[in-house]
Image (cartoon, helix red, strand yellow):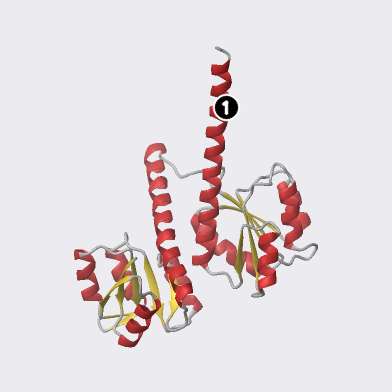
Amino acid sequence: MKVLLVEDDPDFDSYFRALVPEYSVRTAADLKSAMEIVGEEAFDLVGLDLNLPDAAGLETFLKFAGRNAGIPVVIFTGDDNPDHEERLLQLGAQDYILKFDVEAATIRRQLEHAVNRHAFLNSKSQQLTAAAHTEGSRPSARERKKILLIDDDPDQLALLRKLLAPMGFNLREAAGAREARTLLGGWTPDLIITDYRLPDEDGLTIIEWVRSNPALAALPVIMMSASEDDQTVLGALSGGADEYIQKPIRYSVLSLRIARLLEIKEKERRLSEMSQKLEAEKKRLAAYF
């Protein structure tokens, strides 16, 4: 991967290069230099410090992203501020990473996810724009991807709504397993996000029920939990969850997992349609022999 690191701290520059020795890294010590470099050279990703000699704070990101929307940007900062993180992710930053608080395997995964997420979101944006020009309207609620949120914590549900509603999803909520079953009896989502612990049953039980229902068995499911215990993660994945996300939920992680699962589901749907068409064609041709 080719990365432009916009950073005036030589210590972090050295630290970052040591974490990703296989990457091609070029450094710009200020925003003006960074702007000039991206105008002359292509990069897969930009790592941007918010406090530079010629720009500071949110203004740094807005100035850079305003002229370079086609390049995924990851924020590197020493400011552990959830409000700033949320604001920057809403504005289009692909991740918000605290300096000197990452390991090699983690940072590589985060940067690769950032590139993939940016490409996916750009692709979807182009599709929506093309559809709007063709049809003269936005996709209806019926056409939007549907997600069922299962959690008994109203604050957690509010956070998920806040993160997912701007992405255009059609959301419904259930406070427990019984309510979820009732909803799923007359409405089929494209994806389910459930908490591990629910007031009436645990999340594994609802996943088991979904997997045993022929009409729902193929639905992708994301399990959430505050637990860091390996047994909890393994239990969720072996119990039928497609992904496991640790609370507190980060927008960058959640959006990528959802995008990946929906993309897989769409490919499976197309493959199934092709298989059905081929089978029908085989039967048609067999009638002549």
**Residue at point 37% right, 80% down?**
18
Farthest-out residue, top = 288
Q: Quadrant of the C terminus?
A: top right
**Residue at point 26% right, 84% down?**
53
Is residue 213 toward the left or the right of residue 116 in the image?
right
Query: As displayed, is residue 150 above or below residue 61?
Result: above
Farthest-out residue, front = 289
User: From where the camera sits, is residue 183 visible?
Assistant: no
Query: As displayed, is residue 114 above or below residue 227?
Result: above
Q: Position of residue 229 (x, y in %)?
A: 67, 75
Is residue 18 toward the left or the right of residue 269 in the image?
left
Is residue 37 toward the left or the right of residue 280 in the image?
left
Q: Position of residue 4 (x, y in %)?
A: 29, 71
Q: Position of residue 208 (x, y in %)?
A: 74, 54
Q: Indicate the secondary structure of the residue bearing disc 1.
A: helix
Depth order, front residue of 119/188 = 119
User: From where the camera sits, is residue 281 visible?
Assistant: yes
Depth order, front residue of 181/284 = 284
Is residue 73 toward the left or the right of residue 209 in the image?
left
Farthest-out residue, right = 200
Query: As displayed, is residue 262 above or below residue 225?
Result: above
**Residue at point 66% right, 68% down?**
233
Q: Which residue is mark 1?
A: 279
**Residue at point 57% right, 24% down?**
280
Q: Position of residue 42 (x, y in %)?
A: 25, 62
Q: Quadrant of the N terminus?
A: bottom left
Mark 1, residues whose alpha carbon is within 10 Å: few (<14), some, or many (≥20)?
few
Amino acid type of the residue tagged 1 in the rendering: Glu
Please count the marks in the image: 1
